[in-house]
Image (tube, coloured by chain):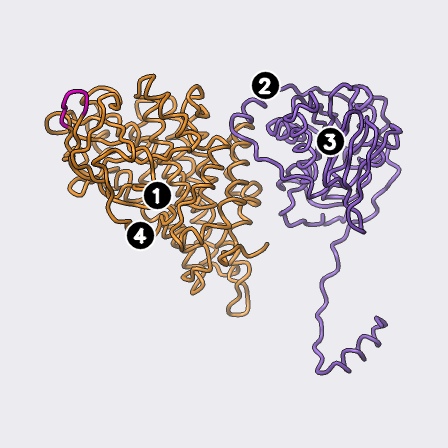
Amino acid sequence: MSGRVLVGVKRVIDYAVKIRVKPDHSGVVTDGVKHSMNPFCEIAVEEAVKLKEKKLIKEVVAVSCGPQQVQETIRTALAMGADRGIHVEVSGKDYDNMGPLQVSKIMAALAKKEEAQLVILGKQAIDDDCNQTGQMTAALLDWPQGTFASEVTLEGDKVKVVREIDGGLETIKINTPAVVTADLRLNTPRYATLPNIMKAKKKKIANVKPADLGVDMASRVEVLRVDEPPQRQAGMKVETVEDLVGKLKEAGRI
Amino acid sequence: YQLAPGGLRGVTVLHISIFNSLLTAAHGLSDEQREFQKVAFDFAANEMAPYMAEWDHKEIFPVETMRKAAQLGFGGIYVQPEVGGSGLSRLDTSVIFEALSTGCVSTTAYISIHNMCAWMIDTFGNTEQREKYCPDLCSMEKFASYCLTEPGSGSDAASLLTTAQLKGDHYILNGSKAFISGGGDTDVYVVMCRTGGKGAKGISCLVVEKGTPGLSFGKKEKKVGWNSQPTRAVIFEDCAVPVANRLGEEGQGFTIAMKGLNGGRINIASCSLGAAHACVQLARDHLLVRKQFGETLSNNQYLQFRLAEMATKLVASRLLVREAATALQENRPDAVSLCSMAKLFVTDECFNICNQALQMHGGYGYLKDYAVQQFVRDIRVHQILEGTNEVMRMIISRSLLTES
């Protein structure tokens, strides 16, 4: 096995920013807004770096798709311990329309090119909440997938994944190469240390275009309109339990 | 945004807008410096801000948190890497302390004092001393204190009375130091003491380890702020310290002390900056929420103008600190004066900013449930220590009037 792990990292609007919809309802305001690495991608990077520290894998490659700014996100991954980065240049309309289908085609192409043993992704991005890229990547590669991972253990040429599912926890064992997507409880991402930030400067980030990977960026999805969630309506107070039951029946809730 | 333990509001949201507002502390920084800043902000928001009220209230010296900070490289930021430091510049250091301060001024200020001591040993120590002390200080396995001030000598530091009499291969120390940050809880004391005659030229710098016979401590002082670090008198009674522990030459101690303080002044000013930024953010948020006379306070022109003045002074302060940091890094002839100017201007202006922010909160500003009062209490002392702002004026005027 190559001992190489590919980790996808997405640059998203920071989780604590108050999102505002653009006046033309075509999307949300991103100009001048703080961006950071998607929290689930941080968890994915942390898991890959831990595997390398345990000497179970040899190299962690951080991948991000987007314009120039995504290099910041790759650098953060490098500062956390990834060995090198790949910046897949996507900008303009292609970037605006980029979704899980395009990213998974890119990840699949890179996984083959880099002969990756594992592809670790965050389970979903906090901007679109799609939760599709990992699954699509596995399908395109015809690789097994261990999604919503809360525990990952490499066992020879297999990987044991404990998955968080509605009913509780499911443990599966899949062959490598495989795709794993990270859930919240998989680990707690480390802070980058000052020495690692400086070392990250010397690590390489390769530039690649989707066309070089044979990927067609055309989107099959068109966003028609983006709106804020409806304002929360005022509730009402009732005097007795009978009143409450009556009101619930009126509203068709029971 | 949740209320942190201890009911502290508003502090954890700071690191968000800090990057996208007019006040952003990230302008003019390199990509690498922004990375350092990000780590420091994240650490401050996650590891410090939720606890700052508790540390203040219960007077806890947060050893474990500081050691976590040291693991990230914050224990010896401008100490050389070969003895465990991070080898960064004064500007990098300022950016880091400014960010950490938004989480807890008092703890960050202590970390900066610790850094200053580690740097003094790194810069003026010989190989044995550097290898003996710096790695443990950089990892915060051991903590340090800077001992210059005495009951009888504050601003007139060169008149210090603690004597160090040479007897064979030891100095015998007698005297006491006052207001020592970390005193009693720290392990390594960098002590300025008199080995020679009167004045600055008779002063040497010795490293004294806790546990040395004859070293004892006064009671823990009760302070208005800086409560997450203990402050005690440090007492020497026939305390024997090996000559091998002397940093540099006899008579070089005062110079070493002052060189340490140049950096210390930038660090303290940086801590004030972080507090002021936090308070401008808190004030702004409060103005947008609090309503009186039928509208939010943010519609009141007096308060708008006040906020604008606070923000302007904050940005001006930041520029001055960063310029001073750059001057010190480059060893420019104006570095000492600039460091004094930065300390003077920034600690004064930032205190006023925090104080005005408190005023804007009305009665709520006076409650310990709200962070703004702690920022005010914590940075008040920055106008006093590491050289009073009056002494800063002495340094600056002397430089102006003796220039040819």
Q: Nearer the viewer, residue B402 or B331?
A: B331
Question: Residue B140, how many percent across, how many down?
Answer: 42, 33
Give the residues in magenta: B165-170
Q: Are marks 1 and 2 on the same chain?
A: no
Q: Is residue B311 shown left or right of residue A18?
A: left
The answer to whether residue B181 is visible is: no
Q: Secondary structure at mark 2?
A: helix
What secondary structure characterizes most of the magenta part?
strand
Where does label 3 land, which residue?
A8
Where does label 4 land, which residue?
B223
State whether residue B320 is above or below residue B252: below
At a point 10% along the width and 29% down the height, the residue shown is B198
Which callout, 4 or 2, points to the residue nearer the camera?
Answer: 4
Indicate the colour of chain A. purple
Disc 1 marks a residue whose amino acid type is: Thr
**Residue B347 - label:** 1
- What whole-number distance in Å separates the C-alpha atoms at marks 2 and 3? 20 Å
